[in-house]
Structures are given as C-alpha cells and as structure tokens.
C-alpha cells in the first residue's frame, strides 16, 4: 500500500473516530421530513390560535385581586424544544437472509431512521397576601416540571424488487424522563395564633434503553408496501371505512401472519420521590419533629431477551378530505417538484412500527416490573386496611360488636367478655385519683374534677384550628373573595374571545407518499381560515396551488436539505440541558414574584457587567451570541461576529480536526516532492 | 478595662452566639442490607437538634427491593398471631399509665436552660472583669461545668424523653420492618440470628457498629419455618432466600455547639487569669 493511501486511510480513520457512533445521516438523496416546536413561543401560539393572551389573563388576576383588596401575583414560564424527524433511503446492495423456515432470499435494504428529541422546562409561581387587621393569610407556591424524550431508531427492512417484505432489523436506544416539584408555603395568622407549614413534594422517573436490538423474519413475504402503490379498486370499501359521500377516498388494509421477532435489550429504570415538611404542628399530634424529609430513590438495571410471534397489520386510505388537497398533489421539495398521493398512512413502515411496539413492551415491562410489584403490594395492603376499617370485636360467645366498644366500661357482649381487663384497663384514673370509664377520656368533656381526663393534645390543636377558622370567618375574607371573583369575570371577558381565532373543527390532516416506491414523504395539517371550503396549509410542505394559512405558529415543518440540517443539529443532543437549555428558560419575572426562596443559592455573577446577572442574562459574556449557541458562553470573543444572533453561522472545524488535516497534509507533502 | 480583655469578652460573646446558632445534637445512622436483597439497599437517617427545631431526614437508596421486602414479609410475632390489637385497648392503658415529666416538650425546656446558661456565662464573664472576686470566679467555673452537662447530656436526654424512649424498651436492629405494625421486627422473628456490635469514639461523637445475619421467618411460608428453625439451610436449599444480612453504623454526637462551647474554655481562663491578677494587685 502506498504511503499516500496509508495517510489517506489514517486521516479518514481519525475523522471517523470523531463522529458519533450510534446514529448517522443518510445519503443526500434520502427522503427526509420532520417537525419541530420551540416551546418558548407557546404562550404566543396559544394567543395566535385561541385569542387568549395568557399574560393578560395573569394581569386580570392581579388586577381583580387588587380591586378586592389583596395582593396576588402569578406567572408561568415554559421553554424547550421538540423534534420529530424521519429519514429513509434504499441500499441496493443485494444481501441474503433466511426466513423463519430457513429459506434463503436475495433481497435489498430499505432503511428508515427515526429521530425524536423532546425537552421541556416549565415553571410556575404564585403568591397571595391578604390582611384584615390582625388576621392575615400569605400563600407562596412554586411548581416546576421537566420532561425529556430521546429516541433513535434505525430500521432495516429487507425487500425484493417487487417490494415484498421478508423481515427487518431494528436497532434502538432511548431515554424518557419526567420530573416534577412543588413547594407550598402557607402562613395563617388568626386569633393570635400562627400556623406556617411549608411543604415540598417532588418526583422524578426515568426509563433508559441503552440498547435494544431485534430481528424480524417472516413465514411468507408480506405485501404491505403495495397498500401505498396500488390504489384500491373497490370504491365501496371507502364508504365502509369512512370515505366521504362522493366515494373519493378509499381504504385498503390487511392483517398478516407476521412471522417471528426476537431480540435483546438493556434498560435502566430510575425513580426518586421526596417529601419535605416543615412547620407542621406535629408536636400536637404526637410527632416531635419540626422538619421531616424523606427520599426514596432507585436505579434498576435490567436486561433480557424475547422471542415471539410478530403481530403485523397495515393499511392506508387513499385520498383526503382537505379541499383543495384531495388526491395527488405536487410538493416542492428542495426546488424539485414531487408528485405525491394524499391520504392516511403510517409515517414509518408498518414493520418498523410493529417491531418497535413489540420490542418495547418486554423492555418496558422488565424495567418497571419491580416497581410495579411494590405499588401493587402497597395498594393491596391499603385496600386491606380500608376493608378492615370497620373493625369488630368478637365476643367469647361469638357475638360481634364494634371494636371501639371493647373495654369502654360497659358490658356490650351478653357474656361481658368485651370488658376483658378486669376493671383496670376499662377505667381511667384521673391525676387526683378519681376513676372514670375509659371511654370518657378525651371525649371533649371534663369528667375528672381536675380535668386530667382531657389530655389529648390533638384535640387542643383542633380547638385552636377552630378558633382560627372562626376568627377568619369574622373578617372580610368572604367578601374579598366574592369581589375578586366578580371582578375577574368582568376583566377576563375582554381577553377571552367567544370564538377562537383558529377553529380546529375546520381542520384536517393528510399524509403524502410516492406510489412508485411506497414511501411516505411528508404530512400536512390544513385549516379553513376563511371558512369558505378551501383549506390552507397550517403545517406541511409547499404544495403547488395551495396557499399558506394566515396564522403563523412556531410549529415548523421541514423537508429535504432543511430537514437534513435540522437532523444534523439535534443528533448529538441527548441531555435535557442541551435540548432545553436553562439559559433560554427566562425565570427572571418569576424570581421577582417569588423572591429569594425561589432561587435561594442564586449566583449573582455578572460577567459582562451589563446589570443583568448571568443566571438571567441570555448572553453572559456580551459577545452577541446567545448562551445556548455560544460554545464558550462565559468568554467573550475579541473579534467576534456582529450583533447578529449567529444562527446562520457556519460551524468552524474543531482543533482536533485542524490538527488531523495538517497531519495528513504533512504526510502527503513528501510524496509531492518525490 | 484594657483593650485585650474587652476583645476577649467580645470574642466570648461571638463564640457563645455562634454556639447558640449551631447544631446542638445529631444522630446519623446508615444501614445496608448486605445479604438477601438485590443491590444492597441502604438507609440513611439524620436527626438534628438546634435552637429552634428538630429535623429528621430519611433517604433510602436502591429502595425497591427493600420496599418489597418490607411489604412481603409477614409479621409472625405472637401478639399479631394471637389477637388483633384494637384502638381502645392500648390507648386507655398507656394514657392511664403515662406520665408527662416536662408538662410539654422536654426539649423546649432544655432549650431555655441552654439559653440561660449561655447568657449566664457571658454575664458572669463580664462581671468577672468589672467586679472580680473569688465568688464570681467560682460562679464562672460552675456555670461552665453546668453548661457542659446541659449540652452533652440534657439535650439528648430531653429529646429521648420527648420521643418516649426509656430504659425498659428493647431495641432491635434486625433490619426488618413490618408495614402492618409500622414497627421494626424483633429478633424473635429470625432464626439462627447472629449479631456483632462494637463501639468507637471519634471527633464526630460515639459510633456504634452493628452487623447481623439471620433467617427472617416472616419471609417463609408457615410450613417452611420450622424446617429453617431446626437447621439453617445452605445456599442451594429452600429457605436460604430468607437470609437477611444487615450492617449498620450509628453515630451520636453533640454537634457544633460543643466545639464552640469548648472554645469558650480558654477564653474563660484568660479572662479569669486577668481577674486574678487584678485581685492580687488589690
């Protein structure tokens, strides 16, 4: 091998070593389409669709409270991103696979990749303060939620030249996570008493599939791709399957004996639950604790394999009911016109959908098996406790009496066996020596002359609560709440239109596929904006002769090169902090409402000294790049880009890539001299 | 008063204030199930007393197998098998016999004592500077000693009294817990039970180490229990799955208040020595 080739191979290997191993981009002529949503614009999109301005509603709440005579502040913040991209292409290399019966078939590959990313951050804050002379109520509440989903699936389907399917292989990895926290502080001052409980509860659950591989092989080749290539001839089927009255849409479908699927997986199921209580009147209920924190956590690893019959069904409905998008349409993808059939069909091949479902069920079951067992046993124990709530005491002669009648000082069984402590336990001895029936203890009346029979501290607590409630009832609290509700009703009317801007009842959706190779190439959501019987594209590809909807949502559709670029951007995002960066989650207003308790350990560093601390600053170093797009958010670049946000910037090569190229060039240079 | 003695007094005040605001008493316990349960579940608890509150933290790592164990085991104590406890029975008996040594929270009383001791020490130190006398010197020493006793002994004892812990109660460290009775499982529910314990003293306080191993009869069916009681099953024999091993460590310490309190000792000595010099000069 020549040095030139050797250096080229080394160079290639070094470059390859830097690329992600789990997923990859398809060829440049692949069919690719997808959608994304930027949750930062959620409130704006709600307003665009429904006409309800959530910020104005918040202001209405605050104004109504102000009118009623108390302070109320509330706000919510949501951010994050969701992405769904599917890409498919053919690999015409002929391979040989064996079906379930061991018969070999010469086939080629159809590859479909599914890439899903979802990350969401949500925070909500609420404070209220009411005072009337000596009585007051203060409420402070903070709630947050985080969720994440990352799924990468590669499906390789084996087909012959007639698109008959002989099986498929699935490689998959994914993570699903969800976390929620709630902090609630309440302070009530009434009847010269103070109650100030602080409650914190939270949970997080996660399910990770580091790897899942499965293999599907058929008994007999299946023809579900033909559902997208051969229009059903019998128009009557359309009527039976939901076609319109004109019979323009027709459906086709079939269930198959899908052969066998087998595979293996590894999973990690994790959870954390915590409860934090502070300031509860525990002492009065016999709990000598002021602060109580409890946390349960686990991370359960699981591995397993499965082998079972593959369920398989497929179908399609040809034609859509979204005029003018009804039969075949011309889609503009990367400036090319593609003729596509409209209708309803699975966005991914039926084999992939069923393989994913069949493979995920045992993996999911395995991960949650132990946890489900705990929940099941705990619930059944609670049910038993509820069932035994009506305790009975069985007398020696077989009679049954309520359990609380035992040793109450009165003989309730005819044989007297319910009074079974020979006079000692059935009575209560007062501090002054008087003896009274045990049932008179803590019955709300003082039966001992020194009152020592009323010694239940919880009764004192309940009495105190009653006094506080009574004191609150004697204030203007009720009138304040009535005034608040009445004013709010009036104020909200202005911000909540009677009819939504975008009537979803006038919407419809359609898939697009190419009939020559039975491949879904996109979808569209249409809405009749003018209510004139003609739909406009709310979400979807550019369709010849069909106009775009006037309402602009931040739900984006992309195909072709645009989708390829989006996929390249998200492939490496596997952590919530990458999909939904904290720096985009602007909680400054919430901090203003909730104060230091919301962010008790807030770092006050202000790197660019612009008066906004880094935690709230979306450009910490003031270099014109948003932090989530800035590789070094805390280090300003001296000759950085202009004030432009940099979204269109071409990513530069990394230092390692530069070194690799220089190394390769250095190796090649002597050859040229030779 | 010279500047050095003023500074010493001021420093004593700061140290006493810091002592008041630091942790008074803490118990840390860690228990790991070393045998019988998957992934060695670990329980960590921390109990802390300070000048305003008692806090308790409990965390369980790898909790699923432990929760399953607690839920699956059957309480086989004689009380649970012979008779059903009723609400009225224990209430009337315990209440009639219960005495309230503190007429309220013992810890709150002791909190008051600690406050009084800290203020008294500071006041007596000031007095020893302004009006030095042998009586004041003796009072300072006495208050310091009383304070030490209150911090080291009275705080934990008052907390124990509030919890109703007394000498006649039997402690169990089998690692078992019954979700029906909400109580720890006694040794008599285990067969071939072996336990080892030891004790050590460190800067954190007194540490107790505990290891136990035994067959939890509550995990076995009624038919299998006698067989396990008769002979301990080996690894491949039925019943071996009930073998539960538990390692525990319990550390009891007086918290930061003792350190700060001890720091007052040299300051006190310095002040008293200065006072003595003044007395001798007079």
Image (cartoon, rainbow, N blue to C red):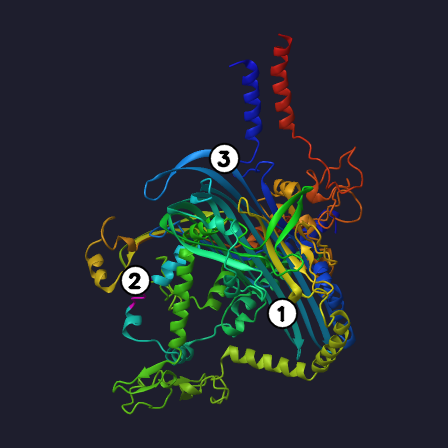
Which is more foreground, mark 2 or mark 1? 2
Which chain letter goes with mark 2?
B
For this rendering, which residue is in front, A525 or B139? A525
Q: What's the distance in space between the residues labelled 1 and 3, CA to CA?
A: 71 Å
* Image position of A580 (left or right of A9): right
Between A236 and A76, the one lying in front of the other is A236
User: Is residue A1 depicted above or below B128 in this figure?
Assistant: above
Task: From the image, state whether disc 3 or disc 2 is nearer to you.
Answer: 3
Q: How many marks?
A: 3
Residue A509: image quadrant is bottom right
Q: Which residue is mark 2?
A: B218
CA distance separating discs 2 and 1 = 42 Å
The answer to which quarter of the image holds residue A547 is bottom right
Find the magenta span and give its range: B73-77
Report x, y in % for residue A610.
80, 46
Q: Chain of mark 3?
A: A
């Amino acid at each position: 091998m020549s040095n030139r080739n050797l250096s080229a191979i080394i160079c290639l290997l070094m470059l390859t070593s830097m690329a992600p191993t789990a997923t990859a981009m398809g060829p440049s002529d692949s069919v690719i389409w997808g959608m994304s949503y930027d949750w930062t614009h959620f409130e704006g999109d709600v307003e665009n669709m429904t006409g309800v301005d959530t910020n104005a509603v918040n202001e209405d709440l605050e104004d109504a409270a102000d009118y009623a005579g108390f302070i109320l502040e509330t706000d919510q913040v949501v951010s994050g991103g969701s992405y769904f991209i599917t890409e498919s292409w053919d690999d015409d290399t002929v391979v040989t696979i064996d079906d379930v019966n061991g018969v070999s078939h010469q086939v080629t590959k159809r590859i479909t990749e599914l890439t899903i990313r979802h990350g969401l951050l949500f925070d909500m804050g609420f404070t209220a303060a009411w005072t009337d002379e000596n009585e007051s109520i203060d409420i402070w509440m903070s709630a947050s939620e985080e969720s994440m989903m990352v799924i990468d699936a590669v499906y390789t389907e084996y087909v012959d030249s007639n698109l008959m399917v002989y099986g498929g292989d699935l490689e998959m990895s994914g993570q699903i996570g969800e976390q929620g926290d709630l902090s609630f502080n309440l302070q009530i001052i009434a009847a010269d008493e103070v109650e100030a409980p602080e409650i914190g509860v939270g949970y997080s659950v996660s399910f990770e599939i580091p790897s899942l591989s499965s293999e599907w092989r058929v008994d007999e080749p299946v023809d579900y791709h033909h559902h997208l290539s051969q229009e059903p001839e019998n128009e009557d089927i359309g009527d039976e399957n939901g076609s319109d009255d004109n019979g323009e849409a027709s459906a086709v479908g079939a269930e198959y004996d899908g052969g066998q699927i087998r595979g293996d997986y590894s999973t990690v199921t994790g959870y954390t639950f915590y409860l934090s209580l502070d300031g509860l009147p525990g002492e009065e209920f016999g709990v000598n604790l002021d602060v109580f924190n409890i946390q349960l956590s686990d991370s359960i690893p699981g591995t397993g394999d499965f082998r079972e019959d593959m369920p398989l069904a497929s179908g399609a409905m040809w034609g859509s009911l979204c005029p003018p998008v009804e039969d075949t349409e011309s889609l503009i993808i990367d400036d090319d016109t593609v003729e596509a059939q409209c209708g309803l069909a699975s966005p991914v091949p039926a084999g992939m959908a069923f393989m994913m479902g069949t493979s995920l069920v045992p993996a999911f079951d395995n991960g949650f098996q132990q946890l489900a067992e705990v929940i099941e046993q705990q619930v059944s124990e609670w049910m038993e406790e509820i069932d035994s709530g009506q305790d009975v005491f069985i007398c020696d002669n077989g009679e049954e009496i309520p359990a609380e009648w035992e040793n109450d000082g009165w003989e309730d069984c005819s044989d007297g066996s319910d009074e079974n402590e020979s006079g000692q336990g059935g009575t209560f001895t007062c501090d002054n020596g008087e003896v009274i029936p045990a049932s008179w203890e803590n019955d709300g009346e003082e039966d001992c002359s020194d009152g020592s029979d009323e010694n239940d501290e919880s009764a004192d607590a309940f009495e105190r609560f009653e006094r506080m409630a009574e004191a609150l009832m004697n204030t203007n609290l009720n009138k304040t709440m009535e005034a608040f509700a009445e004013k709010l009703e009036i104020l909200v009317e202005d911000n909540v239109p009677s009819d939504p801007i975008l009537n979803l009842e006038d919407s419809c959706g359609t898939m697009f596929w190419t009939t020559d190779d039975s491949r879904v190439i996109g979808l569209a959501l249409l809405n009749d904006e003018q209510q004139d019987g003609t739909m406009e594209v709310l979400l979807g590809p550019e369709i010849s002769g069909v106009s775009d909807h006037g309402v602009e949502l931040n739900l984006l559709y992309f195909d072709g090169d645009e989708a390829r670029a989006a996929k390249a951007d998200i492939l490496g995002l596997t952590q919530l902090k990458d999909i939904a960066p904290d720096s985009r989650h602007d909680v400054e207003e919430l901090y203003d409402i909730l104060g230091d308790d919301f962010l008790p350990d807030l770092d006050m560093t202000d790197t660019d000294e612009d008066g906004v601390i880094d935690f709230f600053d979306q450009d910490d170093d003031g270099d014109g790049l948003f932090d989530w797009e800035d590789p070094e958010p805390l280090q300003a670049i001296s000759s950085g880009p202009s004030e432009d946000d940099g979204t269109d910037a071409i990513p530069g090569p990394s230092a390692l890539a530069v070194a690799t190229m220089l190394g390769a060039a250095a190796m090649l240079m002597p050859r040229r001299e030779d | 008063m010279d500047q050095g003695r003023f500074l010493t007094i001021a420093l004593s005040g700061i140290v006493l204030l810091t002592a008041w605001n630091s942790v008074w008493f803490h118990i840390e316990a860690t228990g790991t199930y070393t045998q019988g349960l998957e992934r060695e579940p670990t329980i960590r608890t921390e109990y802390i007393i300070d000048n305003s509150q008692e806090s308790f933290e409990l965390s369980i790592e790898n909790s699923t197998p432990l929760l399953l164990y607690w839920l699956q085991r059957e309480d086989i104590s004689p009380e649970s098998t012979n008779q059903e406890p009723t609400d009225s029975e224990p209430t009337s008996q315990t209440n009639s016999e219960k005495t309230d040594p503190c007429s309220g929270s013992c810890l709150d009383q002791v909190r008051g004592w600690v406050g009084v001791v800290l203020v008294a020490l500071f006041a007596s130190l000031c007095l020893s500077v302004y009006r030095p006398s042998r009586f004041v010197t003796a009072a300072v020493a006495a208050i310091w000693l009383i304070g030490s006793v209150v911090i080291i002994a009275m705080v934990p004892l008052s907390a124990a009294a509030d919890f109703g812990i007394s000498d006649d109660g039997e402690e169990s460290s089998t690692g078992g817990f019954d979700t029906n009775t909400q109580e720890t499982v006694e040794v008599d529910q285990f067969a071939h039970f072996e336990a080892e314990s030891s004790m050590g003293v460190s800067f954190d306080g007194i540490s107790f180490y505990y290891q136990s191993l035994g067959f939890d009869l509550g995990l076995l069916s009624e038919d299998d229990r006698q067989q396990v009681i008769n002979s301990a099953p080996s690894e491949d024999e039925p019943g071996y799955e009930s073998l539960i091993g538990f390692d525990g460590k319990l550390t009891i310490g007086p918290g930061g208040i003792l350190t700060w309190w001890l720091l007052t000792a040299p300051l006190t000595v310095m002040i008293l020595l200065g006072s003595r010099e003044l007395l001798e000069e007079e």
